[in-house]
Image (spheres, helix red, strand yellow):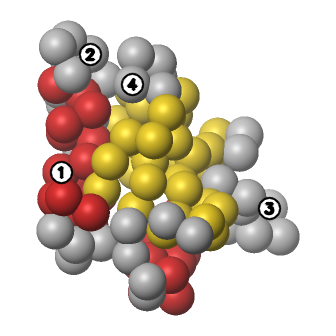
Amino acid sequence: MASNCLTETPKGIILRLKIQPRAAKNEISGLQDDALKVRLTAPPVDGAANTACCAFFAQLLNLPKGSISIASGEKSRHKNLLIQTTDTTAVRKLLAPWLEPDKP
């Protein structure tokens, strides 16, 4: 069963995230509940983790930085990321390794 952390909207894709700031490296560590768990090296101070999150996903998805923004949760570890793109299939394909829950 596929994860429901990705939702298509008229503005693009909403991706639900759980952020762990001050990690050793920037990476997606898998699914946690209904969100992708993302580890970021940036601290949660003055929006540094939000900026790092947007830059991380822009690079991962091969999109311009301006097409990624925090839709909600700017001051929370639980965030909704807005990915403004018309190519939702490509986004799903790039995120596919993390969207399926681990199978026993």
Disc 3 packing (10 Å; few <14; some 14–19; many ≥20)? few
> Residue 76: x, y in percent?
46, 18
Residue 65 in view (yes/no): yes
3 or 1: mark nearer the eye? 1
**Lower sequence index among marks 1 and 2:** 2
Residue 93 in view (yes/no): no
**Lower sequence index among marks 2 and 4:** 2
> Residue 96: x, y in percent?
54, 75
Label 2: which secondary element: loop
Answer whether labels 4 and 3 touch (C-beta < 8 Å). no
Disc 2 packing (10 Å; few <14; some 14–19; many ≥20)? some
4 or 3: mark nearer the eye? 4
Residue designated by label 4: 74
User: Quadrant of the image for the N terminus?
Assistant: bottom right
Residue designated by label 1: 55
Q: CA distance from mark 3 to mark 1?
A: 33 Å
The residue at the far top in this view is 45
Which of these two is toward me, 85 or 10? Answer: 10
User: Quadrant of the image for the C terminus?
Assistant: bottom right
Residue designated by label 2: 44
Residue 85, above or below 23: below
